[in-house]
Image: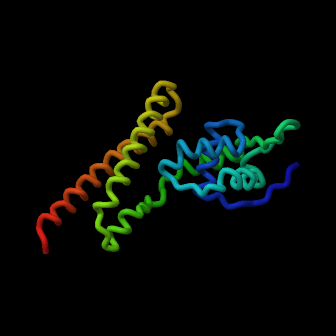
Amino acid sequence: MVKRKPIRLTQTSYAVLALFQHLGEATSYDLKQALEISIENFWQVPHTTAYDEPARLAGGGYLTVRQEPGGRRRKLYALTELGREALATWITEPHAAPPQLRDEVMLKVFAGADPGPLLPARRRWHEGKLAELEGLLAMVHEAGGPKGPERTLVAGVTYHRKMIEMLDALEADTAADRSFPR
């Protein structure tokens, strides 16, 4: 019997378990790539998570680990029954922590910055993310995959559209301030 070290599961742990549920058996590099095009669009994940968290979860019995016998000898991880059960329990809990907004542009505006110079780059970024998510959403629709990723992509598309609207309103408000000297 494999000895397990009891570990505390974090929200990031559940994010990793959820990705392995979709990926099946995968390397840390595969996990990193999947994080970048999915969960990181709505949940900030530390860069090292793709490499540290699978090993930690394997130590707790939530993932299996298998090392390739030859070649690059990569480690391949997969969800265990314990991992599936933990994820299933977590997703059925009727509560979730409130969302967190961390936006440096808003922090600078709060501190007194003129929003004008900050807005064009932020708008381009939101437009780029919007195009990226719309492309991913089209791929998910075409593939007919699970509803969870599709729903988060719809939420992401809506979020970036609303953020562009907010930037437009902020720009109009800033322009109005310039029209009426104080």
Instruction: State the image quarter where residue 153 is shown.
Output: top left
Q: Residue at x 48, y 56 (%)?
A: 95
Closest to the observer: 21 or 168? 168
Q: Residue at x 32, y 45 (%)?
A: 161
Number of numbered callouts drawn: 0
Closest to the observer: 138 or 9? 138
Closest to the observer: 109 or 134? 109
Q: Residue at x 61, y 59 (%)?
A: 10
Name the residue at the front extreme.
117
From the viewer's perspective, is residue 167 above or below residue 141? below
Q: Quadrant of the C terminus?
A: bottom left
Instruction: State left or right for residue 7 relative to residue 47.
Output: right
Q: Position of residue 149 (x, y in %)?
A: 50, 38
Instruction: State left or right for residue 175 relative to residue 124.
Output: left
From the viewer's perspective, is residue 44 above or below residue 156? below
Q: Position of residue 111 (x, y in %)?
A: 34, 73
Q: Position of residue 83 (x, y in %)?
A: 68, 47
